[in-house]
Image (cartoon, rainbow, N blue to C red):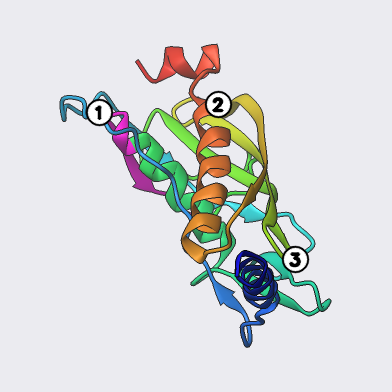
Amino acid sequence: MLRRLLFAAVIAASALAGCAEKGPILLAPGYQAPAEKTAAVVKVFVEVSPFSDGRAHGASAIGKRQIPSGLENDFVVQGTVAELATKALKNALTVRNIAAIDAPAWDMTAEGMKTGGAALLLGGEIRALWLESKATPFKTHVNASVQLRIVVGDGLEKKIVRTIDVSSKLDQDVLYSRERLENILSEALTSAIDQIFKDEELKKRLH
């Protein structure tokens, strides 16, 4: 009986790992705000320009899933990955009591700066924001990679004051679920964005 149960478990696990979903798989990762809340007093106003997407992928593509049969599904987001990254940065500012104001698209040069009077303008480029998921009979190996370049401009003096490169990678073996994959990519994105606020020059300008 025990052998039969074990055999059935192996067959079930193999079947689950091999199940192919039809078409792209929609994920909704985002910035993970800390559980603790701070006093809602705005310290500074910052303008945020939309991220540019420097990846060699489609605008909405955020990864791939492969199952044992060799079939693949694309992971996609609603809207674009650039919009997702921009929103994540704005959320990170907001939880730190920094008012994030929408700014026009910016080429991240001093000459191209257009501000509404805020002291700081933030823009960025996505170098990598990607999730790879490879299923086996008993687990799914997940690799998440995030690389961002953040450019900080002085809105009053119209000059670039800082360029910050941040990155994060996660490798995990998990039981497959969309929620778990979203969480892993959110962790990687959050880790990368949080590194921005450790930059000493930016910290001075945000306080």
Residue 207 in the figure: left or right of residue 25: left
- Against 140, residue 167 (above or below) is above
Q: Which residue type does callout 2 highlight?
A: Gln
Quadrant of residue 150 within the rendered picture: top right
Let me know if residue 11 appears in the view.
Answer: yes
Residue 165 in the figure: left or right of residue 199: right
Q: CA distance from mark 3 to mark 2?
A: 25 Å
Residue lying farthest to the right in this orientation: 70
Q: In the picture, which quadrant includes the C terminus?
A: top left
Residue 189, image x, y percentages: 55, 43
Mark 1 residue element:
loop
Return the disc, 3 or 1, that comes first in the chain's sequence.
1
| Residue under numbered circle 2 | 195
Front-lying residue, 101 or 31: 31
Residue 44, magenta (yes or no): no
Let me know if residue 158 appears in the view.
Answer: no
Tag shown at residue 170: none
Residue 98, magenta (yes or no): yes
| Residue under numbered circle 3 | 57
Q: Residue at x 71, y 67 (%)?
A: 64
Q: Which residue type does callout 3 highlight?
A: His
| Residue under numbered circle 1 | 36
Q: Which residues are magenta?
A: 94-104
Residue 90 in the figure: left or right of residue 83: left
Return the disc, 1 or 2, that comes first in the chain's sequence.
1
Q: Residue at x 53, y 11 (%)?
A: 200
